[in-house]
Amino acid sequence: MKEVVLGALGAGRIGKLHADNILAMPGVRLKLIADPYIDEDWARTLGLSTTLDPAELFSDPEIAAVLIFSPSNLHAEQIITAAEAGKHIFCEKPIALDPDRIRQALLAVETAGVKLQVGFNRRFDPDIKRVKQAVDDGEIGQMQLIRITSRDPAPPPMDYLRISGGIFLDMTVHDFDLVRFLSGSEVDEVYAAGAVMVDPAIGEIGDIDTAVTTMKLSNGALAVIDNSRQAAYGYDQRIEVFGSLGSISAVNLTATRTVLATAQGVVTDKPLHFFLERYHRSFRVEIEQFIRSIRDDTPPPVVGRDGLNAILIGLAAQASLERGKPVRVSEFSGEDPG
Amino acid sequence: MKEVVLGALGAGRIGKLHADNILAMPGVRLKLIADPYIDEDWARTLGLSTTLDPAELFSDPEIAAVLIFSPSNLHAEQIITAAEAGKHIFCEKPIALDPDRIRQALLAVETAGVKLQVGFNRRFDPDIKRVKQAVDDGEIGQMQLIRITSRDPAPPPMDYLRISGGIFLDMTVHDFDLVRFLSGSEVDEVYAAGAVMVDPAIGEIGDIDTAVTTMKLSNGALAVIDNSRQAAYGYDQRIEVFGSLGSISAVNLTATRTVLATAQGVVTDKPLHFFLERYHRSFRVEIEQFIRSIRDDTPPPVVGRDGLNAILIGLAAQASLERGKPVRVSEFSGEDPG
Amino acid sequence: MKEVVLGALGAGRIGKLHADNILAMPGVRLKLIADPYIDEDWARTLGLSTTLDPAELFSDPEIAAVLIFSPSNLHAEQIITAAEAGKHIFCEKPIALDPDRIRQALLAVETAGVKLQVGFNRRFDPDIKRVKQAVDDGEIGQMQLIRITSRDPAPPPMDYLRISGGIFLDMTVHDFDLVRFLSGSEVDEVYAAGAVMVDPAIGEIGDIDTAVTTMKLSNGALAVIDNSRQAAYGYDQRIEVFGSLGSISAVNLTATRTVLATAQGVVTDKPLHFFLERYHRSFRVEIEQFIRSIRDDTPPPVVGRDGLNAILIGLAAQASLERGKPVRVSEFSGEDPG
Amino acid sequence: MKEVVLGALGAGRIGKLHADNILAMPGVRLKLIADPYIDEDWARTLGLSTTLDPAELFSDPEIAAVLIFSPSNLHAEQIITAAEAGKHIFCEKPIALDPDRIRQALLAVETAGVKLQVGFNRRFDPDIKRVKQAVDDGEIGQMQLIRITSRDPAPPPMDYLRISGGIFLDMTVHDFDLVRFLSGSEVDEVYAAGAVMVDPAIGEIGDIDTAVTTMKLSNGALAVIDNSRQAAYGYDQRIEVFGSLGSISAVNLTATRTVLATAQGVVTDKPLHFFLERYHRSFRVEIEQFIRSIRDDTPPPVVGRDGLNAILIGLAAQASLERGKPVRVSEFSGEDPG
């Protein structure tokens, strides 16, 4: 098995998680990690070479692929640079919040003929894969409705929210991707209803914290997502796909399957509290599949267009919220996705 | 305890169910039941007096209240006649599909000073009452979102569908009432997305069989209902109310709580298949509370305005579906419900 | 449908429950109820005729069957008197605590050629019937193990415990009957381990409050029952039958199927707290089937021998506890039940 | 953090699993692995040094601890040799099937002053740790009963069964350890009822495949374990501890938390099929804690006496089965464990 040599940009929370996973993968070497604020203690414990200068990665001929775990506003530029350097690319979502900027990045990738995988990790979660399998194998018949509940345990800091692009581009974008993934179909039209119920400060910066988003899909089915920036009981991640023969649902995962029965009631665990716990396996599997696509020279499982289209749906949702009526995604895509 | 004497109009499926329940209630006498197509064998077995002529009920001075279980298109007229005869009235939903006709009926009730209870039975279901209690007692904090799934096991006959008023007035109207009941609030605006996924014949008569309806409530919260005319696994009736301190959900009821584990999987019961099974207790309790409101001379727990407002939301939903955009309920109520 | 006329002995808690049920049964008339301490208000509300003298029932030629809901120590004598009067008999468990006394009663029944049904109501519970069906239909293959958990919410009063016959004859006897019912087999040998963990006063009267009873069945399978006189979370009634193809379990029933999720955990209802709630349907069904066996002249679904054999197992369990080793049931039956 | 250097004896299924886990532990080095039938391809892929000769490990002064993953019949001898070489020892269960042989091994460990941890991995399972925590924190009050269901998906090969020591020493021994672990108490007396229900061939070699084992504990509580060598639906591992304030249960883990609802029923996943999947985390944690006990010079979390006492209970269970009556564990321990 030929070794695949990687370089990483960014060693924040998500970058460290990925690095830990990659170190345990046979046949893969994480040669260099670039971060202007690198945690040297962490890197030393893991025996990782570091640099403050991303250019070192791009110029290293041994490095076959670059993993982009940097702040979102750097993604597009780093994709372009990496593509021009002939590196394959794994990039955390989003590529950019501006679709034109995304298109520039995708053009660079296409021109260079390198692979780009976007970090929609949830597609690789075992429970979600089981849902997808039930859909694809016809266990629920013809798809009629997708229903997603996606609620965070607590809002991110206001400093983050200000540059997040709003709830639809920051949070719902994962759910939009799942709608596309599970349906194998595009979203034609979006209607978003929103409210500020969690924290008035979120409203003051022009964002919302509670949303119900309805979609019409090109396969004729409907989809609906409800989001909240805060669920008191933890990270609530549920999916249901309903079809002509039945439904397949994924309910919340818990730390244990224990049950405490007392005079106060019968109590089970709250959902796993944090996205890194809930989706921990998916982060490893998405990188494994990226490595495999390089090794086998096959298309990566999540491509640039997936990154673009989820953002386009998010923009349509945002426009719907502002206009108070449904918006067609084609308004943003410059094409008819049907 | 003073006996309450009742007369009933209609002894079809729902009328028989109610009659069975009433016969087991202490202090209540079902004196006469009028139906042009009365099932005499059934009546004789239960020892019920029958007539083909509704007028007999209205003119009987001993009868304090009339129970209207007749076809929907007769409800409003019978309410008016009963009110003019000074009888208290229990009427199955809907009062009428036309809000002006409903208003005529409510005016007659008000003028006569009699009580009118509308048959939104689900409010009396033990599970739904527990949800309401959690909301009212503050167990979930400030309400942020109501989520209802309401799917029938199979569509009604096409003959019925043609006169049903459409999915929103026929089926979702129960869910609209629950949104009002659980929130203690009014619906300001409705957006309905619909599809014909179950049976093309439903589309041919201008109706839909699959719907997602989003609502903005006057308390600032959102609500969303998903409906289907057919769920392969049975009658799917779930509610979730989400608030600042947590959520309260009601999942499906089953005939047993048994679990069969074999090499094929771990199998539990499907939901109770039929609305008469699922909500059987609620049908008895709603009548008990109607009797109590007569006995104690208190307002009935579901009043005429509840019957009207649910229909107005349904009309707004239908208009939203047709126009492809959100519609304010006030357009149909002639007032601002906020 | 020919009317079946009944008389009842005893109108305590269980007698009232049965009377309420019987009044709602078509084609059945509860003509007379005898109780030296009859609650006249209750009887008047229901329109029931009462007497202080049981002899009135026995001598009434119209009464076809006598329902014995009196204190346990009167059961055998009343069975004998009723049999001699030619009445069919439904008798709450136990017939007696002394097997010779039971045999006398059964002999009287046999001699008179009347029907006797013993009140092992749990056999008619819908969940337990589903378990039985899975066993009988071969859904779990060849039976290998029966596992029963049976825990009361709280111990009965000490005055009752003193005359109860001990935990095995009073409480476990229901579970012993279920082992026989579910297996369609007899119990050959019993080993009982006991402890006083709930209340030392129970130990002081020579009884135990916590028990694990293991049985070897004549079909080769094993069975195990764990009992407690007190479960803080309510009435715990679970059954599992394990076989070569899988298992069928019945878990606890609850008042609602609601789920409350907050920062404190995910909470569902405690088990239904009281045996009258948990098994309410079974009490009605057992009488319905008794009526049917009279009407159709078929054997009742639970016969005198069922009442005897459960007691014999209980006596063997008690002997096992005292001797500290397994005891064969045949020691008490005077026969080899294999 | 000072590096801990390890050597391993045995690289079969369980040895490979442990080696994989150890390679991902920071601050730990697996220097050498000895196995006469070593899988060289596997070792090379992981970069592991191997030898056919265990003596190399014992004589290597850099190796601080020896991990014994060899066949059970070698354990005691290897413990003695390792202890004499001054190595700390982690040994898979059982130390030996003969208690005198175990005592020899423990004496060698004590004499050498090294640490010995026995591989009762289930103690480190997150669900079981949560049960233990509920017990220790008083969440269920005073312990009254422990109930364990432990069923394998399929019997091991007959060749293995012949040398396994029988179901109690091979399979139930894990459950006996859990009874001791959860109760913090010793087992005084055991009664075992057994049957051959799965495979007659198991009976022909003098073993059983179905068992119910009842125990009296020195804290006054009872415990009961039911075992089967074959559950058609997979690996069934459930625990319930019942106390004066309630109960804590651990139910089966599944690969996903998805629910498929169709006309055939509502289906969830079968239990994880294999002990390596079910308890995969526990295998890592037990080694981590062994490493920590070396690093911090604290007693290991599972000691030699734990290995001995579980075997003594197993011997008492086997004797009980053969004699058909309860047996005191002290008969085998040569002491009164109370």
Image (cartoon, coloured by chain):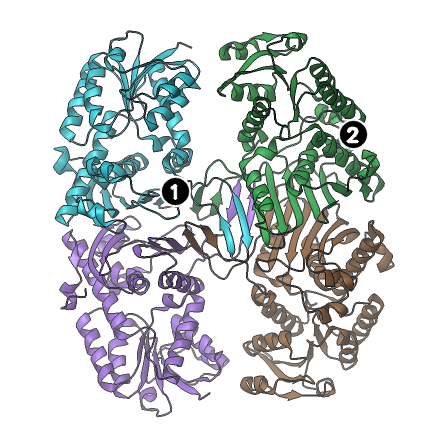
Chain colours: A cyan, B purple, C brown, D green
Q: Secondary structure at mark 1?
A: loop
Q: Does B318 appear above or below D181? A: below
Which is in the foreground here, disc 1 or disc 2?
A: 2
Mark 2: few/some/many CA within 10 Å (<14, 14-19, 20+): few
The quarter of the image holding the N terminus of chain C is: bottom right
* Residue A260 position in % (x across, y down): 54, 49
Tell me which residue sits at (52%, 16%) in the image. D3
The span from disc 1 to disc 2 (Cα, nearest Å) is 48 Å
Tell me which residue sits at (27%, 76%) in the image. B74
Amino acid type for the residue under numbered disc 1: Ile
- Of all residues, the one furthest to the front in this rendering is D297
> Going by the image, does C151 lie left or right of B239?
right
Tell me which chain the residue with mark 2 is part of: D
> Going by the image, does C177 lie left or right of A41?
right
- Of all residues, the one furthest to the bottom in this rendering is B61
Q: Does D47 appear above or below D223? A: above
Tell me which residue sits at (29%, 51%) in the image. B199
Q: What number is the disc on residue A140?
A: 1
Tell me which chain the residue with mark 1 is part of: A
Amino acid type for the residue under numbered disc 2: Ile
* Residue D204 position in % (x across, y down): 78, 31
Mark 2, residue position: D205
Q: Quadrant of residue D7?
A: top right
> Going by the image, does B312 lie left or right of A125?
left
Q: Does C118 appear above or below B43? A: above
> Going by the image, does A320 lie left or right of A250?
left
Q: Are marks 1 and 2 on the same chain?
A: no
How many marks are shown on the rendered structure? Answer: 2
Q: Secondary structure at mark 2?
A: loop
* Residue C316 position in % (x across, y down): 81, 56
* Residue C21 position in % (x across, y down): 57, 74
Q: Quadrant of residue B273?
A: bottom left
